Amino acid sequence: MAKNILICDDAAFMRMMIKGILGKGGYDVVGEAENGLKAVEKYKELSPDLVLMDITMPEMDGIQAVKEIKKIDANAKVIMCSAMGQQAMVVESIQAGAKDFIVKPFQEDRVLEAVKKVIG
């Protein structure tokens, strides 16, 4: 059975790129959100197996969104994505409850490897 994934990134082309990579890996993208607030709403609505979450977004950043999603579902699985491989952000993401961290620009095999590691 295909795993359902929610993609959250403020850049439409990034969401499209991730969607393409996940599609090749046999995963279903069930929803997209362009900011953290929408990601939290979509999570409630869709209950995906995994969320790929950008860190830097308008309205609510990815780290805050992870904290909100974790309040709704303590078992939520989230992989953070960011162009900034800053150590502090990686640490903060993991502390907020993210399972893994991938850096942009995405390498297809790294994305699929992270997703597979987290949800199989």
Image: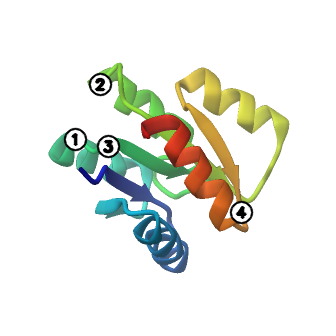
Please name the amino acid that badge 3 sits on: Val
Q: Which of marks 2 and 3 is in front?
A: 2
Label 2, label 4: how many angstroms apart (C-alpha)?
A: 27 Å
Q: In this view, does 98 lie above or below 28?
A: above
Would you name the residue on which mark 3 appears? 40
In percent of width and height, residue 44 lies at 20, 40
> Which residue is nearer to you in this view: 8 or 117?
117
Q: What residue type is labelled 2?
A: Asp
Q: Which numbered disc covers residue 47?
A: 1
Q: In which quarter of the image is residue 57?
A: bottom right
- Which of the 4 image quadrants contains residue 87? top right
Q: Residues within 10 Å of mark 3 (few under 14, many from 20)?
A: many
| Label 4 crowd bin: few (<14), some (14–19), many (20+), radius 10 Å | few
Between 38 and 47, the one lying in front of the other is 47
Identify the residue position indicated by label 4 in the image.
Answer: 104
- Between circles 4 and 3, the one closer to the viewer is 4
Q: How far apart are marks 1 and 2 (CA)?
A: 9 Å
Which residue was labeled with disc 2? 73
Circle 2/circle 3 CB separation < 8 Å: no
Label 2 Cα neighbours within 10 Å, binned few <14 / some 14-19 / many ≥20: few
Q: Nearer the viewer, residue 87 or 24?
A: 24
State the SS at label 3. helix
Q: Can residue 55 be seen in this view?
A: no
Snapshot colouring: rainbow
